[in-house]
Image (cartoon, helix red, strand yellow):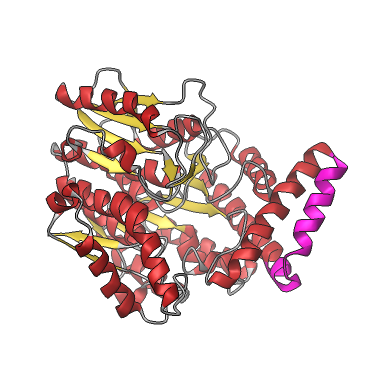
Amino acid sequence: MRVACLPLDSRPCNALFPVQLASWAGAECVTPQQAEMDDYTVPASFEAARAFLEREMPRAGAAVISIDRLCFGSLLASREEGVSEAEALRRLDWLADLKRRFPSVAFHGFSVIIRASISTLSSLDLDAYHAMTDYSTWSDIYGETGEESARRKAEAAKARVPEAVLVKYHAVRARNHAVNRRAVALAKEGVFDSLALLMEDAPRQGFHRAEQRALLRLMGGDPRISLRNGADEGGAIAVMKALGGAPVAADVIVLGDETGRFTARYEDRPFRENLRVALNYAGVVATPGAEKALVVICPPDGNQGEHGETADPAALSPMADAVNALMDAGRQVYLLDLVSANGGSFDLVERLTDPMGLAAYSAWNTASNALGTAVAQLVSDARSGRVNRTFLRERLLDDLFYQSCLRQPLNDKLRALGDDPFNLSDKPRAEALLRESFAACDHPLLQRLAPFDPSLPWRRTFEARIDCQ
């Protein structure tokens, strides 16, 4: 099977993971050439996307298409005004024509419901980012309850946002919602064999909730269309779906969420709902006792903070014991570490008898980003009949060591040098400091993960690329 993948953007999670996991599964995933890709704040062109898809359709068995990449040029560009609503819809209509010309190629689309707030492209954006989140949240609460206190809080937050930022925000929301409505209509017409609507970073309430309700009405229960939290995992899990094959059996074990009410940070619904939708989308069937076990570790107190903001570490011991027992029994454990957001838990991993005995580890960014990556690897391993130990090593190095241990000290060093971790002026210097940080870390697990080469894909430190040798 050859899958043509138009990724959300050029970061490894979007452009590299799908290629790696498809290759491991014995398939081929092709992505645009480097010159056809975006670069941080510089979007890719529609002409490049069109050229790529036109070039690949005659040889592809399936296509995975980021609608945000097609219509706007990248995820970051989807939050900007560079493309008008009319032009974005014209690009979607071109895609519909492409499907008519290649009806035997399965089209799997995914589209992002824009986040509650704005992008943070420099440290100066942080105040407006937090204010916009509050404005969105309290506006939605006021709309639902009519409470005067909510209205006052919404107005106070709105006053903290520069007028130009507000105008752009509402215009972009309206345009992107129109694109998602058209994407749903095209799916119902058969242009997309599947369409995943992915809600990126969002609190439980905000302007996005009304948009979701409208989209759900349009979907009308169509089984080809799904809606869940996520964004950056969308391409990897969609490529695994595109490969097809028999359903994959996995024992799904959720620890620390006995009530089923745990809602992860940056997400707007109980995590179990996202888990159910993602598994169904990927063709994974919950099967008690199966050899593969997807083990989800939730925060012991139900509150997911940023890494380092965890509850009593001792509360993780029973969960670690359960994971150890599964590995001792010879089960393949795909560990989803949701103890905190934006990085893994050393308190959890250090309680494992042998972290290298895991089949997979995922803990990066939001809970659903981590979920989709773990599920994609699980499906890839099932198709190959082997566990991808290289991908495991790279995720431990990135999700655990970089995100939880090294990124914040690296940011502090860069700020002391007068640089901005959100918009690096000297990327080579930052990468040199990154390599020095790994070299100076003497954790025994890190030594077992060598050799590897860390780098920064963009001019910021939010994500790293780790290549294991």
The residue furthest right is 148
Q: Is residue 1 visible?
A: no
All told, the count of numbered labels is 0
In the picture provided, is 274 more to the left or to the right than 82?
A: left
Residue 8 coordinates in the image, percent (x, y): 42, 60
Residue under the image location 25 percent in, 36 percent down: 245
Question: Residue at position x 59%, y 69% from top?
Answer: 125
- The reply to whether the magenta stretch includes residue 156 is yes
Image coordinates of residue 194 in percent, x first then y, are 44, 44
Q: Main secondary structure of the magenta part?
A: helix
> Would you place residue 217 above or below residue 459 in this image?
above
Q: Nearer the viewer, residue 13 or 301?
A: 301
Q: Is residue 315 left or right of residue 356?
A: right
Q: Residue at x 40, y 73 (%)?
A: 414
Q: Which residues are magenta?
A: 146-168
- Is any part of residue 457 visible from this angle? yes
Q: Is residue 221 magenta?
A: no
Q: Residue at x 30, y 31 (%)?
A: 294
